[in-house]
Image (cartoon, grey):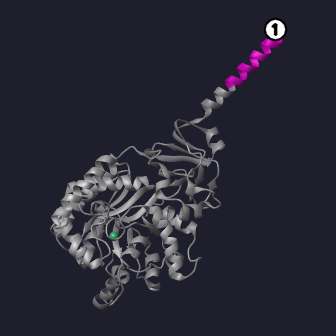
Amino acid sequence: MTLRRALFVLTLQFLYSLSLLSETNKQSADLLITGGIVVTMDSPRSIYNDGAVAVTGDTIVAVGPRTEIEARYSAQQTIDATNTLVLPGFINGHTHVPMTLFRGIHDDVTLNDWLYKYIFPAEAKNVTEEFVRWGTRLAAAEQIRSGVTTFADMYYFEDVVAEETNAAGMRGVLGETFIDFPAPDNKTNAAMLAYTENFLKKWQGDPLIHASVAPHSIYTCSQETLQDAAALARKYHATILIHVAEMKKELDDSLKNNGMSPVQYLEKIGVLGPDVVAAHCIFVNEADRKTLAQRQVGCVHNPSSNMMIASGVAPVPEMRAAGIAVGLGTDGPAGSNNDLDLMEEIDLAAKLAKISKMDPLAINAKAVVEMATIDGARALHMDKEIGSLEKGKKADLILISLDEPNAVPMYDVYAQIAYALKGSNVRTVIIGGKIVMRDRKLLTVNEQDAIAKAREYKRKIAASLGMQ
Ligand SMILES: [Zn+2]
């Protein structure tokens, strides 16, 4: 009996030390996200039905089946992702975030009337650093809530946009606007160049903020302004953000004044290159698409905006077929789309392509999810950093709840994301390994303050335009 008991105790001790050994053999990570359906968007488009992601610092260290990851890693913090989709964060490739404060200022008008009767006067009277700060803070709350982790922005006082984006823990490709009329921040070209150079220097090497240069378009910038902006960007290896071929008038004027399309004109003056992100690209013919592909320009499709202003339909299937990286953007959030919900753009990108071609096969659900994630990253020239859940990439990921009436049943993951799930289904958001929203509670932005400020700005802006 005694011997048997002793053996039993010894065996227990042995087993216990073995388990300790395996526990100490585990690598330590900072954060484990376990148990959800992990939709990686890596090149084989791997999906792990009971998956896990391990994060150390701001980087993903492992992705795979839950049992495998749990056997290899222990972490101080674990997020239970059961009954959620775990996806790379969405990428909003084109917007003007401080304009949240002009949301709905005047809709159902022509772009020309909207710009000249409402927006330009409203901007001249109201856009200050404070305005940009509160508009960006409100936009950060809205974007995080709907699963956007990276956005590309073009506005004024972009340094303030950068400060707020950084404070919210979001990733941004933030372009200071170049435009040939006195802007709210810089009144001359020399002032614009000096402001932007300081802005680029200040944020060099920042992990979240990619300070960029944003010549507005070929119809608001002279050749000299476009070339100066591009040269400055290239001196600092910064991205160039620009609106391209958005309007029929832009194409007609370019054909008349330059004897060529907007894309060919930008090519001729040396602006196009693998550091350019072109928003819209609606009026791009086959030769233009070839040029954009050869120059490795990233394009951003904005279906809500293109429909709301009745600009036209970008030839997205043709652009993708030509090898161009096409991302998605909300544009707006005022006048051309009054919100920043990228999941709406995923849905609309598919439906707009289908109806415009009268072909339900024109583009499929998987393609539009690619546009919101990995192709969006390629369009922003950031696919080495973000866009998929892979070892070595930044830990930007979102959990979308499947415990919702509109989320069940689920037969196809991509179709569910594109056509059934909504931005409001996003439950938890992690950017660079940091949890910025947990169970729908924002952790980096004081949302109530931003909402109250937006109401206050509405009264001020309305009064400045004589509306009530
Ligand atoms: Zn725009």
Where are the magenta residues, as a range?
A: 1-17
Number of marks drawn: 1
Provide residue 124's location: percent of width, then percent of height.
17, 67
The residue that appears at 48% across and 60% down in the rendered structure is 383
The residue that appears at 32% across and 64% down in the rendered structure is 96
- Type of amino acid under label 1: Thr
Q: Is residue 338 magenta?
A: no
The residue that appears at 25% across and 74% down in the rendered structure is 115
Q: Secondary structure at mark 1?
A: helix
Tell whether 24 sits left or right of 202: right
Tell whether 362 sits left or right of 137: right
Provide residue 448's location: percent of width, then percent of height.
32, 47
Vertical position of residue 336 compared to residue 2: above or below: below
- Displayed-image quarter of ligand 1: bottom left
Tell me the quarter of the image containing the C terminus: bottom left
Which residue is at the front of the view, 20 or 421? 421
Q: Is residue 15 magenta?
A: yes
Provide residue 430's location: percent of width, then percent of height.
46, 48
Vertical position of residue 310 compared to residue 23: above or below: below
Tell me the quarter of the image containing the N terminus: top right
Mark 1 = which residue?
Answer: 2
Label 1 crowd (10 A; few <14 / some 14-19 / many >=20): few
- In the image as oriented, which residue stretches furthest toward the right? 1
Whether residue 440 is visible here, answered yes or no, is yes
- In the image as oriented, which residue stretches furthest toward the front? 468
- State the image quarter where residue 441 is shown: top left
Whether residue 273 is visible here, answered yes or no, is no
Vertical position of residue 278 compared to residue 23: above or below: below
Tell whether 204 sits left or right of 379: left
